[in-house]
Amino acid sequence: MHSFGYRANALLTFSLTVLALMCAMASITDNFNSPSPTATVQILNVNRFQKKASGDDEVAITLDISADLQSLFTWNTKQVFVFLAAEYRTPKNSVNQVSLWDAIVPTKEDAKFSIKTKNKYRFIDQGSNLRGRDFNLTLHWHVMPKTGKMSADKLVLPGFRLPESYRSRRPAKHPAKAIAT
Ligand SMILES: *[C@@H]1O[C@H](CO)[C@@H](O)[C@H](O)[C@H]1NC(C)=O
């Protein structure tokens, strides 16, 4: 007759084998999921565009980001990290990448969203290259699985352009009233 210890051990080994198999299957079936995320981004406003004292250009914008990343979620998805970057060429660098916004998407329900937001991280060029600059907005994502390898991809939204000239802060929302004489 088998001892209790032997049986417990056999059960544990069996459980671990099943668990390992399930993990392997989870990450394999994940590879068959061919997601098709969609996104659109609009620049609602250029709030400020200036050359800083340091000589670097800085632009502050308001974005409207709409995305449907639900197809990235499978039963093996823990969460999705997403960030929006401005990508542009300058005479010095073939690729400049500036991260403007990011978020962690915890569930499939949250993966379809539309938000209006100012750039969360500063859009600064190391130089004075932003006037009239063409750029792409690229939505990058990293899918963090419950088990298996992390995967990443992106969606390029081309065809954006910064204004030709600097502009200062918008006028105050409540300008001083004219004094009637
Ligand atoms: C912007 O996107 C277009 C079209 O996908 C691509 O040809 C171009 O190289 C991109 N520009 C940069 C700076 O990545």
Image (tube, rainbow, N blue to C red):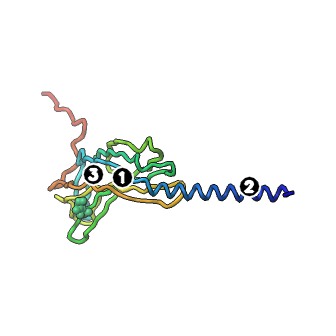
SS category of the residue bearing label 3: strand
Name the residue tied to disc 1: 101
Residue 83 seen anywhere in this rendered image of the structure? yes
**Residue 140, horizontal then vertical, whole percent:** 36, 56
Q: Quadrant of residue 8?
A: bottom right
SS category of the residue bearing label 2: helix
Number of residues whose C-alpha sits closer than 10 Å to that of mark 1, classed few (under 14), some (14–19) or many (20 or more): some
Name the residue tied to disc 3: 60
Q: Nearer the viewer, residue 105 or 29?
A: 29
- Camera-side mark, 2 or 1: 2
Mark 3 C-beta to ligand 1 under 8 Å: no
Check if mark 2's residue and mark 1's residue have beta carbons within 8 Å: no
Name the residue tied to disc 2: 11
Check if mark 3's residue and mark 2's residue have beta carbons within 8 Å: no
In the rendered image, the residue lying farthest to the top is 181
Residue in the image at 51% along x and 48% along y: 75
Residue 53 seen anywhere in this rendered image of the structure? no
**Residue 141, horizontal then vertical, whole percent:** 39, 55
User: Gap between marks 3 and 2, in whole Å?
Assistant: 61 Å
**Residue 27, horizontal then vertical, whole percent:** 51, 57
In the rendered image, the residue lying farthest to the bottom is 92
Where is the N terminus found, in terms of image quarters? bottom right
Q: Nearer the viewer, residue 145 or 60?
A: 145
Residue in the image at 47% along x and 45% along y: 107
**Residue 3, horizontal then vertical, whole percent:** 85, 57
Amino acid at dot 3? Ala
